[in-house]
Image (tube, grey):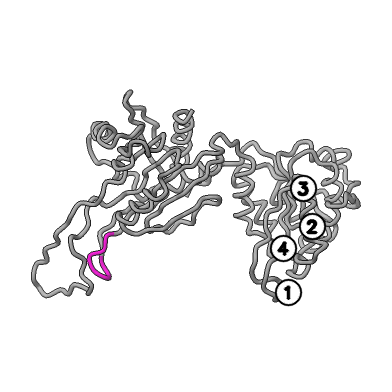
């Protein structure tokens, strides 16, 4: 899948302190850069005992600062580096560094940087459970939060010492997701968006069913982009093999009926409904409670129509969301069929595409269809289509 450059143009300063979780910080640098960020690294001398500065220099492409007296990044690096940063991430953040930050102590490259910073800062704590739960440490964490510092984590789980409990540093992927959410503008802050994604599955018997090739990628890309823009996102998803985007509430369903039930339950107080799911039009009239055996005879499968979720939401009247967006996956007469769907479903926008090209693919060649006409987006990654949809949604919600 093509990687999204969600942090392009951003400079992130990674402050690495001396804990066993330092090895995760190497992966964190790689992932931040993969998202387009320019990453600079500052380390304590203790951190350098776990992983050498050379490793971070090779990963980031920049000299690593390990001392207040290091002038390779300019005179007074604790001042200069902070001035150019969009975000400082302290990962791992040890109990010692947290205590210094809470008390304003500046006695190494990292603690001096923290004291002199102008950029926003986030701590990703990593320590033994007993150290995390120590009353002094918890007081220090509260002090950081009162000072406007972000605290991301820790997670609970198996620790390096063999104990189990709170104290694990968040995984690099989650830290990157939190950085994306933090650094993005929030044009949809305060908005509630309901999205459906993926296929539905209509059982024939305990082992067979009717479904389709929808991967859910487009719906998940839209959910992720909406969350990045500050919206409160609920994602009702059919069976897919994708993890829910960070900051998105996912509700998993199988059938069209179950999806309809969840959509109608969550529609009240929703500002926008985006129906991306490839909902089965038909379901078996009867579902066998036993596996249907092959006996050489033809099997007749009687089908009945599934509820039309998009149309039902579009025609809700007083309870209708302010904006209703649907998708039309067609194999022919794409714009014509999408225009008919726009009117029939009482939608504000239909995103039309060629089903044979879009299903299961990372790319999409979409067309916006409204009452004013058709607007081709051109071929591109589904992340770009998601951005275009959220741009249009923001203008419709004004």
Q: Which residues are magenta?
A: 202-208
Disc 4 packing (10 Å; few <14; some 14–19; many ≥20): many
Mark 1 and mark 3 lie on one chain; the one further toward the N terminus is: 3
| 334 displayed left or right of 13 | left
Q: Secondary structure at mark 3?
A: helix
**Could you tell me if residue 50 is visible in this image?**
yes
Q: Position of residue 70 (x, y in %)?
A: 88, 46
* Nearer-the-camera pick, 136 or 206: 136
**Do the residues under discs 1 and 2 have CB atoms within 8 angstroms?**
no
Q: Which residue is mark 1?
A: 161
Disc 2 packing (10 Å; few <14; some 14–19; many ≥20): many
| 196 displayed left or right of 116 | left
Q: Position of residue 377 (x, y in %)?
A: 40, 31
**Could you tell me if residue 353 is visible in this image?**
no
- Residue 17: mark in rendering: 2
Q: Secondary structure at mark 1?
A: loop
Q: Which residue is mark 3?
A: 146
């Amino acid at each position: 899948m093509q990687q999204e450059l969600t942090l392009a143009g951003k400079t992130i300063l990674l402050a690495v302190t001396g804990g066993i979780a330092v090895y995760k910080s190497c992966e964190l640098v790689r992932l931040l850069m993969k998202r387009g960020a320019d990453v600079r690294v500052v380390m304590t001398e203790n951190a350098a005992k776990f992983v050498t500065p050379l490793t971070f220099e090779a990963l980031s492409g920049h000299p690593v600062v390990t001392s207040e007296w290091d002038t390779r990044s300019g005179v007074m690096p604790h001042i200069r580096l902070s001035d150019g940063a969009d975000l400082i991430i302290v990962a791992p953040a040890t109990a010692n560094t947290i205590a210094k930050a809470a008390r304003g102590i500046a006695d190494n490259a990292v603690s001096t940087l923290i004291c002199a910073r102008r950029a926003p800062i986030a701590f990703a704590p990593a320590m033994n459970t007993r150290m995390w739960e120590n009353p002094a440490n918890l007081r220090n964490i509260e002090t950081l939060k009162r000072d406007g510092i972000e605290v991301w984590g820790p997670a609970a789980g198996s620790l390096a010492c063999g104990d189990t409990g709170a104290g694990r540093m968040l995984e690099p992927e989650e830290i990157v997701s939190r950085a994306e959410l933090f650094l993005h503008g929030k044009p949809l802050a305060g908005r509630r968006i309901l999205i459906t994604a993926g296929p539905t599955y209509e059982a024939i018997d305990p082992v067979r069913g009717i479904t389709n090739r929808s991967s859910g990628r487009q719906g998940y890309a839209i959910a992720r982009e909406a969350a990045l823009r500050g919206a409160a996102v609920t994602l009702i998803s059919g069976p897919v093999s994708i993890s829910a985007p960070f900051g998105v509430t996912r509700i998993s369903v199988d059938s069209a009926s179950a999806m309809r039930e969840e959509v109608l339950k969550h529609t009240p107080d929703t500002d926008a409904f985006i129906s991306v799911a490839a909902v089965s039009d038909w379901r078996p009239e009867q579902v066998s409670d036993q596996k249907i055996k092959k006996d050489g005879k033809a099997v007749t499968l009687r089908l009945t129509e599934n509820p039309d979720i998009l149309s039902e939401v579009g025609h809700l009247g007083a309870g209708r969301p302010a904006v209703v967006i649907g998708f039309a996956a067609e194999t022919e007469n794409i714009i014509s069929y999408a225009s008919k769907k726009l009117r029939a479903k009482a939608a504000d926008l239909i995103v039309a595409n060629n089903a044979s090209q879009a299903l299961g693919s990372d790319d999409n060649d979409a067309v916006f269809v409204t009452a004013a006409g058709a607007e081709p987006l051109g071929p591109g990654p589904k992340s770009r289509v998601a951005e275009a949809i959220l741009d249009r949604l923001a203008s419709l919600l004004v």
